[in-house]
């Protein structure tokens, strides 16, 4: 009777924990200096050394088949342990819909004679214009209307009967089986990294269903709510905010529009931060509006939850316009972006990694904020000696804004965004959804003049705005043009019969009138510009560049390659844009006489300082000692790109130098990097002109915030080109352009 009474009391007390034996397999664990895993009858305790002498501790168990984080704690060197959380339940929710191919893709496949069910099934995974959660649907999506039953929501459940502890280089993980999450099933895993205060929690799961697109929320529930509980963050204006959870309990997660995607629990003597992976968490959108990517949820008067999330709806950018007509049009454009919210891909059988990070700290919230932001250089693209930061493909409608305001000196809202990110060179893309882009000359040249003069006024020392364009005519698909000076040109379709390819205009001087692919190549050669495929194999470039791989303009060394954009996002892939981007780049280098390059681009629209731009942008570092002034020639930029003297990066991994040493068959690829997150792997990729192969260099023994030199010998026999890339444990990366092997 006494035993029954004790069990009844435990059952009635909320949050009471009944000890349960734990069967944990440590066969995959080998002692790692600075990290220790100990298995007891009821728990596995992982302790490890963190940053600046900190010690971290995480203890895990199982209760009724439910994995349990029994404790999270941190201490300074020689100090007392600070408990940051106890008896926490790993929590996930998932929302799934059906992936569809876009109308633009389908139409191009029809025009190319390749519109079969098999091809659509392959190409749909590269869809950009999709909104699987929007009922009945809109935008450019096919096969509408959607049905209510397509959208399903699931919360995690567990039937875990044990765990596994494994070490891999300088990291240790603990995994629990028996996870079910909506249409997904798999395991729950926690990973700690030597020398870092980071703890990664992830659901690693697959679905056997077809055409699944999804988003997730991940975190922990069961944090004790006390009189001194305090959650802190910075708002979109970078002002400190907090909540003490003194209001009513929440029905669902409160997604916080926190700057830097960072929410911190102030635990008195210590603190616990929660945030998503910096870049891999984000799928491509047409803007970077901060939708609120971290959350809290007051579950009751005694406990609350914390985590990272993707909300179920996007939002359009802030509309603009002074005249009534422009305001009405831009409001409609901004609202239309709600129809484009593509989610993640989950092809059947692929193991999706749905991750969230915690940062355990024995210090207060301000110190923790600084420590977490160090991993992304404070969300700034760090200056590197001998390089300048280059980005582009932004449809800002600059000339239309200036004409609408009748003010050439208007300071566009996107200028402080780019300057605050540490970007030195921005190439724009007016004449896309604005202005008289197909006008044969009279209107267009006047608008180009505003475009050029406006760009000049926004430029400064070490900040250059280049008025470029995505013309999208005569070649097929979409393509981009960049020149070493402003060029007046038109591209009416068809070109008026009375217009010549080139003429002297009494107002604008030399002007071009394009009417064919030969005209385009001729102009690019005369003006010493460069051009490339925009968003290859997706959007309105489905089927390109392969359709024109034998054309003279593609084979020209003025056609540099294609753009790189993190689209699509598949959380089973180890590299961002693993197949579409790098697959396209490798194919182009095989087709052409010389290797082609991938220039990292944004392909987004207007920006505001309250946007969350850093995580959704991959940029280029180009070898330059200084940024040319607007009135100077931009040839150092154009020719630097043409020569492949640049690399793409998310910002956490930075190259300082690289190259191929030696001659003949025996060569050595050398590179030097700096990085923040512990690294995962590097890869040397090569091809004989037909077959692509690679060598993987495991880097899991690295600790955070380091530098590394690579000297990788390889046999150059029969190889046409070689390239190199490095990826870290959070999915961030940096890639170099291919080098021809002669």
Image (spheres, rainbow, N blue to C red):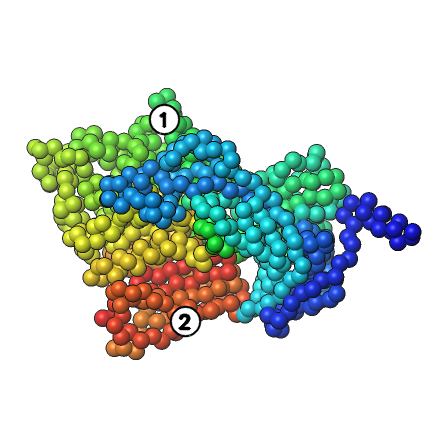
Q: Is residue 14 left or right of residue 723?
A: right
- The residue located at (39%, 63%) in the rendering is 725
- Which mark is drawn over residue 487? none
User: Quick one: SS at disc 2?
Assistant: strand
Q: Farthest residue in the top direction?
A: 324
Which label is found at residue 710?
2
Image: 447 above or below 161: above
Q: Nearer the viewer, residue 371 or 55?
A: 55
Q: Residues within 10 Å of mark 2 (few under 14, many from 20)?
A: some
Q: List x then y, in percent, for residue 89.
A: 67, 50
Dot 1 surroundings within 10 Å: few (below 14), some, or many (20 or more)? Answer: some
Q: CA distance from mark 1 to mark 2?
A: 53 Å
- Residue 121, position as x, y percentages in the image: 37, 46
Place residue 99 in its image quadrant: top left
Q: Nearer the viewer, residue 516 or 687?
A: 687
Labels 1 and 2 touching (C-beta < 8 A)? no
The quadrant where residue 727 appears:
bottom left
Residue nearest the viewer, comparing 253 with 40: 40
Residue 171: % across, % down: 57, 66
Of 576 and 605, nearer the camera is 576
Name the residue located 45 percent from the left edge and 65 percent from the top edge: 681
Q: Residue at x 33, y 35 (%)?
A: 397
Helix, strand or loop for disc 1: helix
Give the residue at x 27% y 45%. Answer: 114
**Residue under circle 1?**
329
What x and y, as percent, mark residue 557?
20, 57
Which of the two discs, 1 and 2, labels the residue nearer the N terminus?
Answer: 1
């Amino acid at each position: 009777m006494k035993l029954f009474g004790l069990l009844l009391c435990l059952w009635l007390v909320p949050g009471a924990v009944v000890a349960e034996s734990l069967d944990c397999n440590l066969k995959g664990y080998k002692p790692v200096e600075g990290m220790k895993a100990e298995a007891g009858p009821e728990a596995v305790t992982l302790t490890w050394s963190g940053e600046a002498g900190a010690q971290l501790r995480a203890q895990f168990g199982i209760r009724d088949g439910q994995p349990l984080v029994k404790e999270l704690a941190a201490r300074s060197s020689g100090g007392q342990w600070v408990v940051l959380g106890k008896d926490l339940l790993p929590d996930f929710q998932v929302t799934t819909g059906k992936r569809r191919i876009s109308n633009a893709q389908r139409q191009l496949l029809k025009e190319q004679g390749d519109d079969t069910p098999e091809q659509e099934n392959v190409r749909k995974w590269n869809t950009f214009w999709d909104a699987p959660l929007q009922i009945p649907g809109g935008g450019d999506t096919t096969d509408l209307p959607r049905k209510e039953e397509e959208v399903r929501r699931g919360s995690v459940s567990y039937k875990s009967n044990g765990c596994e502890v494994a070490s891999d280089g300088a990291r240790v993980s603990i995994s629990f089986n028996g996870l079910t999450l909506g249409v997904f099933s798999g395991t729950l895993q926690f990973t700690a990294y030597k020398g870092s205060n980071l703890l990664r929690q992830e659901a690693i799961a697959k679905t056997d269903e077809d055409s699944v697109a999804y988003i997730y929320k991940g975190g922990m529930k069961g944090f004790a709510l006390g009189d001194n509980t305090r959650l802190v963050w910075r708002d979109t204006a970078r002002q400190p905010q907090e909540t003490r959870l003194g209001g009513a309990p929440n029905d669902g997660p409160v997604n916080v529009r926190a700057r830097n995607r960072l929410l911190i629990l102030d635990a008195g003597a210590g603190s616990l931060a929660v945030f998503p992976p910096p870049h891999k968490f984000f799928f491509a959108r047409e803007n970077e509006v901060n939708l609120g990517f971290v959350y809290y949820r007051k579950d009751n008067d005694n406990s609350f939850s914390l985590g990272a999330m993707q909300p179920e709806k996007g939002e359009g950018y802030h509309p603009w316009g002074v005249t009534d007509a422009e305001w009405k049009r831009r409001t409609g454009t901004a609202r239309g972006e709600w129809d484009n919210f593509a989610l993640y891909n989950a092809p059947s059988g692929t193991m999706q990694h749905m991750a969230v990070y915690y940062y355990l700290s024995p210090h207060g919230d301000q110190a923790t904020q600084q420590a977490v932001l160090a991993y992304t250089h404070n969300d700034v693209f760090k200056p590197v000696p001998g390089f300048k930061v280059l980005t582009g493909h932004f449809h800002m409608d600059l000339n239309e804004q200036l004409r609408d305001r009748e003010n050439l000196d208007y300071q566009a809202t996107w200028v402080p965004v780019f300057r605050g990110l540490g970007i030195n060179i921005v190439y724009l893309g007016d004449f896309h959804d604005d202005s008289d882009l197909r006008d044969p000359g009279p209107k267009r040249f006047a608008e180009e003049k505003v475009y050029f003069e406006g760009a000049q006024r926004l430029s400064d020392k070490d900040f250059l705005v280049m008025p470029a364009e995505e013309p999208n005519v005569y070649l097929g698909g979409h393509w981009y043009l960049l020149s070493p000076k402003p060029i007046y040109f038109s591209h009416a379709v068809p070109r008026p019969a009375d217009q010549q390819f080139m003429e002297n205009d009494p107002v604008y001087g030399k002007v071009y009138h394009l009417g064919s692919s030969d005209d385009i190549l001729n102009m690019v050669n005369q003006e010493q510009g460069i051009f490339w495929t925009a968003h290859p194999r997706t959007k309105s470039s489905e089927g390109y560049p392969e359709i024109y791989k034998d054309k003279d303009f593609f084979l020209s060394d003025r056609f540099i390659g294609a753009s790189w954009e993190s689209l699509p996002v598949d959380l089973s892939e180890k590299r961002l844009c693993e197949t579409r981007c790098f697959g396209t780049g490798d194919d182009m280098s095989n087709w052409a006489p010389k290797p082609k390059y991938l220039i990292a681009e944004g392909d987004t629209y207007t920006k505001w300082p309250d946007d969350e731009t850093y995580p959704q942008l991959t940029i280029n570092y180009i070898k330059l000692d200084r940024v040319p002034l607007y009135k100077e020639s931009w040839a150092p930029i154009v020719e630097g790109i043409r020569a492949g003297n640049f690399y793409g990066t998310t910002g956490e991994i930075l190259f300082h130098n690289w190259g191929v040493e030696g001659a003949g068959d025996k060569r050595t690829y050398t590179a030097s990097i700096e990085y923040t997150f512990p690294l995962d792997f590097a890869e040397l990729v090569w091809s004989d002109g037909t077959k692509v192969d690679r060598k993987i260099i495991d880097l899991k023994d690295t600790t955070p915030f380091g530098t590394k030199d690579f000297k990788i010998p390889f046999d150059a026999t029969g190889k046409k080109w070689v390239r190199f890339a490095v990826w870290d444990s959070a999915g961030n990366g940096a890639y170099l352009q291919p080098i021809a092997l002669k």
